[in-house]
């Protein structure tokens, strides 16, 4: 029966170098939470402040679901969370 090979020892310097590379390769995601009215969101879409990218999936809500959402907005009920991605290239 063969003896199992021991894994090579990793030096403290190698660990530090690996951790530094992880930090360097990591991307920071900045975000903030805010509440916008439906009217403001619609205006931002109309003004071109928000755009739907070409890779966005097609609309999938059926008419009944759209109607219930509009009704809940008119009644002042909370709407679902939306994720909006900023594009720093568009900011002047």
Image (cartoon, grey):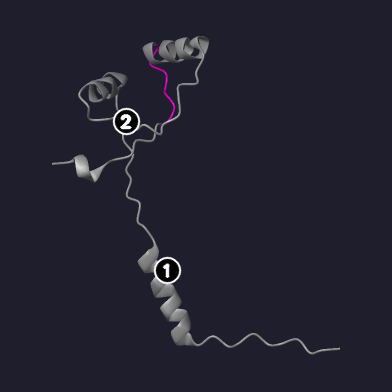
| Quadrant where the N terminus is found in the figure | bottom right
Residue at horizontal 46 percent and vertical 83 percent from the top: 14
As for residue 29 lying within the magenta part, the answer is no
Question: Does 17 sit left or right of 50 as displayed?
Answer: right
Left or right: 68 in relation to 23: right
Picture residue at 34% right of the left edge, 35% below the top: 84
In three-dimensional space, the C-alpha distance between marks 1 and 2, rounded to whole angstroms, equals 34 Å
Packing grade of label 1 (10 A; few <14, some 14-19, many >=20) is few
Disc 1 + disc 2, Cβ < 8 Å: no
Q: In the rendering, at what x and y percent does residue 3 appear?
A: 79, 90
Identify whether 67 is placed above or below 51. above
Q: Which residue is mark 1?
A: 22
Residue 88: percent from the left, percent from the top?
A: 23, 45
Q: Give the SS element for disc 2.
A: loop
Viewport quadrant of the C terminus: top left
For residue 35, the mark is: 2
Which region is colored magenta?
A: 75-81
* Secondary structure category for the residue under label 1: helix
For the point 27% across and 30% down, the residue is: 50
Pointer 1 or 2: first along the chain: 1
Q: Is residue 65 left or right of residue 70?
A: right
Magenta stretch, main secondary structure, is: loop
Q: Residues within 10 Å of mark 2 (few under 14, many from 20)?
A: few
**Picture coordinates of residue 17, whole percent (x, y):** 41, 79
């Amino acid at each position: 029966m063969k003896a199992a090979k021991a894994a090579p020892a990793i030096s403290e310097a190698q660990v530090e170098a690996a951790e530094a590379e992880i930090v360097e390769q990591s991307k920071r995601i900045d975000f903030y939470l805010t509440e916008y009215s439906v009217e403001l969101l619609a205006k931002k879409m109309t003004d071109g402040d928000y755009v739907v990218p070409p890779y966005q999936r097609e609309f999938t809500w059926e008419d009944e679901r759209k109607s219930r959402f509009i009704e809940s907005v008119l009644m002042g009920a909370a709407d679902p969370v939306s994720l909006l991605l900023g594009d720093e290239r568009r900011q002047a």
